[in-house]
Amino acid sequence: MTEWMSTGPVRHIPEEELHAYLDQALSRSQCVEIECHISECPACEQVRNRAAAVRDRITAVLAEAAPRKVRIPPFEQLVARRQAIEQRRATWISQARRGALLAAGLAAAVGAGWWSRGVTGTGAGPATPAAPSQILSPRPTLALAEREAAPATETQARPTGRVAPLSSERSLVRVDRSTVPEGIVQVNAVAPDDEGLSFEGLWQTVDAQRAAAETGGNLPRIEGLPILEIQLQRGNGDERPTVVVYQQHPSGKVIRTIEGPMERVEELVARHSAKNLGLHASQPDLTPPDYMGDAGANRRVLRIVTVTGLLPADSLNALAKTIALKE
Amino acid sequence: MTDELERLYKTTYTAVVRFLYRKVWDADRAEDLAQEVFIRAMAHRPEKPRAWVFAVAANLARDEARAAIRRRKHLTLLSSDPLPMSTPAPAADEQMETDERKEHVNQALATLSDRDREVLLLWDAGMSYPEIAEQTGLAVGAIGTTLARARKRLLDAYDRMDVDRTRAAHS
């Protein structure tokens, strides 16, 4: 700092140091040194005056581009908004937990049923291989859970030739239990979705190219997992679409990455959690919001992304962390 | 901590809005984003709340710009649509001039490098040299140099536009 004060040929204060001086970013001793030098150096005084003029003009120019008078909203308003967000998240988490508990209970009940059938020999238990095929789940809600619990390719079960039609016409799940080890239910899905998770409203199945275009190249998905299907639902006005990307987890289970307006996604997850026992959802993450309406009447629509599936919540959380599309 | 945050909110909110406004060029969005910043601060409880608030504001503004590109929308205050042909009322005339000046500042700021613009806007928001250095990753000693350069360049660009505007008005 004091190099310019050293002996030898006259040295002047660098202009950037004068800017720092004018911005009061220097220590008191540095300021004293500069003031002493300026009092004896007309050239530096001139540079100081010029820098001060530039600084003042910049302040004025930037003031021209200031927003209208800013009204500071009451702090309590922000606190209330924060609490509302936390409450929504807590509700979602409790719903997911309730779903998990129900799923665990159901799994235990199914397991007990299998075991008792095996012991008594009254059904297609593991001790006595079944008749060609069995309909495991006539109920659509159960069918989804089971479908997701196994590899999703239909061809895997076909070689046995034991795929039976379903008793329920609405169900898309077919089961061949004879080739499956004890305690494991192999289910073959015809499509990555079924009525167990039907989405209300107009949904379009699109290819990756179209989906990338609709989402501005930010298709929410887990990197490295094969995509089975992509569904879009158009938003209102300029709102970006709600997107559901179905992917196959290495375990064979289908996982869905859902990205869209917070309320819409929360509603979907809550409804699906209620319908499909055992369905878990990852902790939601904010994604860039949508801004709606013209200038002066803007409304911000918060958007979130979550991953759902029949995997433990911890696994889904870990998967969700790999999604790049986050705020 | 809440008291501290509330104090920071009351003293810094306007500066954050100004900072954001010069990035998104929309008063409503700037206020909206500023509120989002402080809501996040409540959840995160940062150790250095003031620096944190401006860092998050800068990130939100960057995301906002990305979103704008994605939606292929310009976030400039002024529409690129042609101005109305009817004779504007005096108040509208004044507003147009104000908007035009803002647009000039916007364009002049756009001529700066990202780093120069960031440093200048942080300084204008009232941040100290060490705070600016921490946020931008520059050395404290480099802030004066960067600011001196940014100020000169901004004024040069602004004055050039002013000359062009005067010439256009007289032609």
Image (spheres, rainbow, N blue to C red):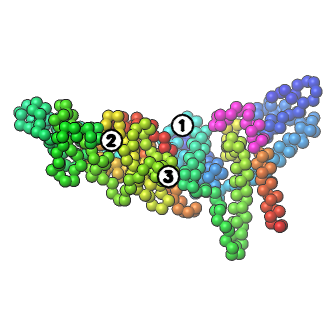
Q: Residue at x 69, y 73 (%)?
A: B85
Specify the label residue A213 is tagged with: 3
- Tell me, yes or no, whether the highlighted magenta stretch contains residue B147: yes
Query: Circle 2 is placed at which residue position?
Result: A254
| Chain letter of the residue carrying label 1 | B
Q: Are marks 3 and 2 on the same chain?
A: yes
- Precedes in sequence: disc 3 or disc 2: 3
Q: Residue at x 32, y 43 (%)?
A: A96
Q: Which x, y percent locates residue A25?
A: 74, 36
Residue segment shown in magenta: B133-150
Q: CA distance from mark 3 to mark 1?
A: 38 Å
Which label lies toward us, 2 or 1?
2
| Chain letter of the residue carrying label 3 | A
Q: Which x, y percent locates residue A293?
A: 53, 62
* Residue type at numbered disc 1: Pro
Which label lies toward us, 3 or 2?
3
The local crowd at label 3, few if under 14, some if 14 to 19, many if 20 or more residues have their Cα within 10 Å, is few
Q: Are marks 2 and 1 in contact (CB under 8 Å)?
A: no
Residue A164 seen anywhere in this rendered image of the structure = yes
Q: Are marks 3 and 1 on the same chain?
A: no
* Residue type at numbered disc 2: Val
Q: Are marks 3 and 1 in contact (CB under 8 Å)?
A: no
Residue B84 sits above or below residue A185 on the image: below
Query: Circle 1 is placed at which residue position?
Result: B46
Q: Residue at x 48, y 43 (%)?
A: A325
Q: Residue at x 83, y 38 (%)?
A: A15
* Residue type at numbered disc 3: Ala
Pick whichever, B153 or A155, lies toward us. Answer: A155
Q: Which x, y percent locates residue A118?
A: 10, 32
Q: CA distance from mark 2 to mark 1?
A: 38 Å
